[in-house]
Amino acid sequence: LHLSKAGLNVIVLPKAADNDIPGTDKAIGFDTAREIATQAIDRLHSTANATHRIMLVELLGSSSGWLTMGAGLAAGADVILIPEIPYEFDVVIDAIHRRKAAGRNFSLVAVAEKARSKELVDFMELAASKRADSIEEQEKAFERIENNYSAQTLLLARRLGEATELETHITILGSLVRGGTPTAADRLLANQLAEWSVRMAVE
């Protein structure tokens, strides 16, 4: 920012494992993170099937569900929960009950780290509205309140276990998906963006 204000031509490249940068279709690193997350869910699939468990896989995604949605769909997760759409416990429980009734005594749940239940979001919105008047102040209050509610995946696992009588296990991939060897698609995207950035800076 300081160099740009001083007159230097600066180009900023979008790089984010969870693809949460507004105004861009695909950030550098997203394809690699999605591939690693997909492989992890694939591996957990066989364990869930063999042990008749509900396996919850928590992925990066504090404001965006791209990584969870992409890896969940690619690996065939049975339930996918993302931050953009608050979930209802009853709907998730019903989906797992229907799988049990069909003879599938295991389920894979892909959940973004900031996915929240509808009842929690409703409570936080109500609390935020009572603490502030303007919409901007309410949004800030909501963020402060939300930071007090971590470990929601743990709560979800406990409620699913109680409701379905299936053992639940949580695997938190976290920053693990940020490392490793980049996919060919990410390497090509980075090269293309770098080339065009140099051209634009020069021109």
Image (cartoon, rainbow, N blue to C red):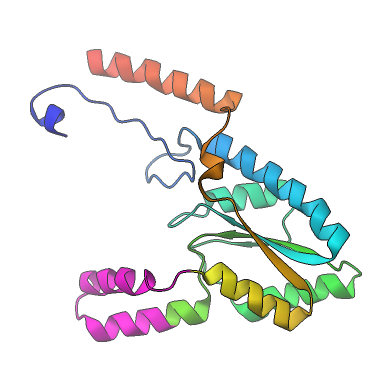
Q: Please tell me how many numbered marks the rendered image carries.
A: 0
- Eyeballing the image, is 174 above or below 114? above
Front one among 184 and 163:
163
- Magenta stretch encompasses residue 132: yes
Front one among 155 and 78:
155
At which x and y percent is residue 175? 51, 46
At which x and y percent is residue 177? 56, 42
At which x and y percent is residue 116? 50, 70
Which of the 4 image quadrants contains residue 169?
bottom right
Which of the 4 image quadrants contains residue 156?
bottom right
Q: Is residue 118 left or right of residue 144?
A: right
Quarter holding the C terminus is: top left
At which x and y percent is residue 197? 33, 20
- Magenta stretch encompasses residue 200: no
The stretch of residues the image draws in magenta is 123-150
Q: Is residue 201 left or right of residue 126?
A: left
Which residue shows up at 34% across the image and 75% down it? Answer: 145
Which residue shows up at 51% across the image and 69% down it? Answer: 151
Which residue shows up at 21% across the image and 72% down it? Answer: 137
The residue sitting at the left extreme is 6
